[in-house]
Image (cartoon, rainbow, N blue to C red):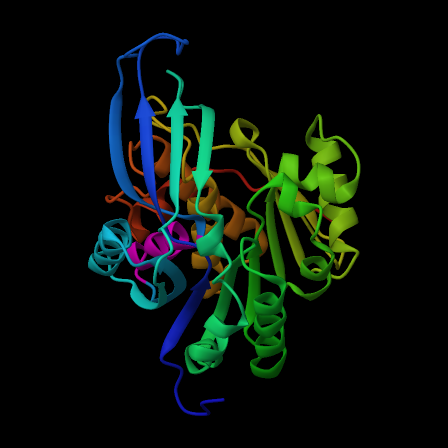
Amino acid sequence: MNTGAQTVEIAVIGPSNLDVLASGNAQWGAVRSNPAVIRMTPGGGARNIAENLARLGLRVTLLTVTGDDIFGEFVTRRTAQAGVTIAQIVESGVRTPVYLAINQEDGEVVLDIFDGEDCLQGLSAVLGQKYIEQLQDARFLVASTDIRSDLFSLLADVADDTGATLVVAVSAPSVAARSSDWMTRANVLLMSSDEASVVAGSPIRNLDEATNAASQIALQGCGTVVVTLGARGASYATKNGLTGHKPAINPSSEVVSTTGAGDAFCAGFVYGLAHERDVDECVSLGLAAATLTIVCSESVNPAINSSRVDEAAGTQGVTPNT
């Protein structure tokens, strides 16, 4: 470990990909040439988190894997331009992942398709070992659950050795079913209600059930569990028995796309942790960042910054329970 001054505030570990986002005013149907607006933008859960954090003024290094192609070059260049330090492995002969999302008029995703499983295999301990010094110099390690188990084990070991805070963002319900190690070794676990219902083994139909699920998961060893609930906000619980719920922040304009909202929530939450805010405030900051994202057509709102997030978070009431 580097025992001098830490040079990396946050290390984010996980996938980068190209997002292709389509939105239209008509109902999607099985007809030719549905009218739509189509945009290509850098994406990937970890990459989005890293860019949001950089735009919030934090020092961020992204450990990721891309293919040796024009999509990888585009995503890497745009991410670096946003202020993120890139630590990557470029896989020869492997395509950079592509995510396609089709949004309906209210911004909700009606269809999403992912192509890039081969590239995700590179998110292994080899990546972590190559950039071990960056990991050891970080105060916060933020990992997407798209990474392989050997890389997660390495991250957890580094966090144990250095005292870094390990934040895990669950990426999908199918991955949540394999989350036992994350629950016992992560300091913070962020997940949607669909993912939390898989982990807790029971449906989440209301706020009480969301809080109960968060509490149940936290008792398995994780320090803090946050369950995001879309338009209903987010509920949280800690292993020390603190629970609470924060309502969603109403956006000032219509929802454009929900793609990237969960990644923005994670970034806002970590932004709060980096500034030593308590869990209730961190959840508010996460919701504020998500709100600023869903009114934008890109996966990361290029206008997001710390002042706007702090201002939006300040509009929320505090409703912690003890």
Furthest toward the bottom, the residue is: 3
Q: Main secondary structure of the magenta part?
A: helix
**Residue 298 versus residue 129: which sits nearer the camera?**
129
Q: Is residue 179 left or right of residue 103?
A: right
Residue at image x 42%, y 45%? 264
Q: Is residue 133 visible?
A: yes
Q: Is residue 319 visible?
A: no
Give the image location of residue 251, x and y in percent: 38, 28
Give the image location of residue 57, x and y in percent: 30, 61
**Residue 231 versus residue 18: which sits nearer the camera?**
18
Q: Quadrant of residue 197?
A: top right
Q: Is residue 300 left or right of residue 173?
A: left
Give the image location of residue 181, x and y in percent: 71, 61
**Residue 124 versus residue 177: which sits nearer the camera?**
124
Magenta region: 46-57
Give the image location of residue 150, x and y in percent: 61, 68
Residue at image x 63%, y 47%? 175
Q: Is residue 78 left or right of residue 156?
A: left
Q: Is residue 264 above or below residue 153?
A: above
Q: Is residue 56 highlighted in magenta?
A: yes
